[in-house]
Amino acid sequence: MNRCALLAACLAVSVSSPAQAFDTPDAAEARVRDCLTAAAAAHLLPPAILVILLKVEGGRLGHVSRNTNGTVDIGPMQVNTTWVPRIAAHWRTTPAAAYAALCDDLCANLEGGAWILRQAVDEARGDFWGGVGIYHSHNPGYSTRYLRQVLAAGLLLQVQAERLPVPVASLQAAPPAAPAHLASRN
C-alpha cells in the first residue's frame, strides 16, 4: 500500500468532494498532510492522534450523522453541533459559516476537531488520554470505550504503516503511551 492509499484509508475522508477537488492523488495527499500538521501544530498535539481520531470517528466531508439527542456530528472529525457556537467565536465568524466550513472544508474540520481536543486535554489538566476520552464524552463509561477504540485504531494503523515501503515521516510522531489499564483489557 503506498502512502497516499494509506492516508486515504486511514482518514476515511472524501477529498474528491466537489468543494475540494484535486488534480492528482499527490495533491490530495499533500493537502491532507498539510491540514493535519497545521491543526496539530496550532493546538500542540501529535499529528498521529488526529489520524487515529479520524479513523475512529469515520466521518467524511459533506456528511453529517444524526444523534439520538437531536444533535448532529459534522464531517471527518465528527464535530458535534453543540460545539459550533464556540468554534464560530474561536474563528470570529457566524455559526452558519462555521457549520458550513466544518461540513465542507477538510482543513477547517481538522482545525475544529483539534481545537476541541485541546480544550478537552486542558479540561483534563494536561492528562492527554483523559482529554482524548473527553473529546468523545464526559461519561466515564463512554470515554473508556472510546479510548479502547482509539488504542485499537492506533495499533492497526501502526501495523499498516510498518508495511509501507516508505515511512510517512510527517505522521510518525506518536502520542504518549496508552494507560496500562486500557491496553491490558479486551
Image (spheres, grey):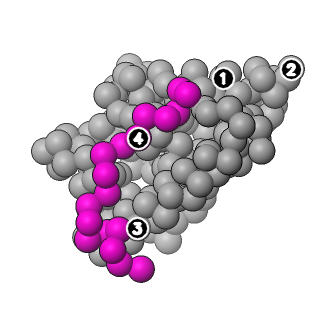
- Residue 117 appears at what percent x and percent y? 34, 42
Magenta stretch contains residue 13: no
Q: Is residue 17 left or right of residue 57?
A: right
Binning the other alpha carbons within 10 Å of mark 3 as few (below 14), some (14 to 19) or many (20 upward) gives: some
The residue depicted at 49 percent of the width and 54 percent of the height is: 154
Disc 2 element: loop
Q: Earlier in the sequence, mark 4 or mark 3?
A: 3
Q: Earlier in the sequence, mark 1 or mark 4?
A: 1
Q: In this view, does 108 lie above or below 134?
A: above
- Residue 18 appears at what percent x and percent y? 81, 31
Which secondary structure dominates the residues rendered in magenta? loop
Q: The C terminus is located in which quarter?
A: bottom left
Q: Distance between the residues labelled 1 and 4?
A: 21 Å
- Residue 179 appears at what percent x and percent y? 26, 61
Q: Is residue 158 above or below residue 86?
A: below
The magenta stretch spans which residues? 169-186
Q: Mark 3 points at which residue?
A: 148
Q: Could you say which disc has been placed on residue 31 in the image?
A: 1
Disc 4 element: loop
Mark 4 and 3 residues: CB-CB less than 8 Å, in contact? no
Mark 1 and 4 residues: CB-CB less than 8 Å, in contact? no
**Which residue is at the far bottom?**
186
Q: Name the residue under label 2.
A: 23
Q: Is residue 2 left or right of residue 182?
A: right
The amino acid type found where label 3 is placed reads Arg
Q: Name the residue under label 4.
A: 174
Q: Earlier in the sequence, mark 3 or mark 1?
A: 1
Examine the image and state in which quarter residue 105 appears.
top right
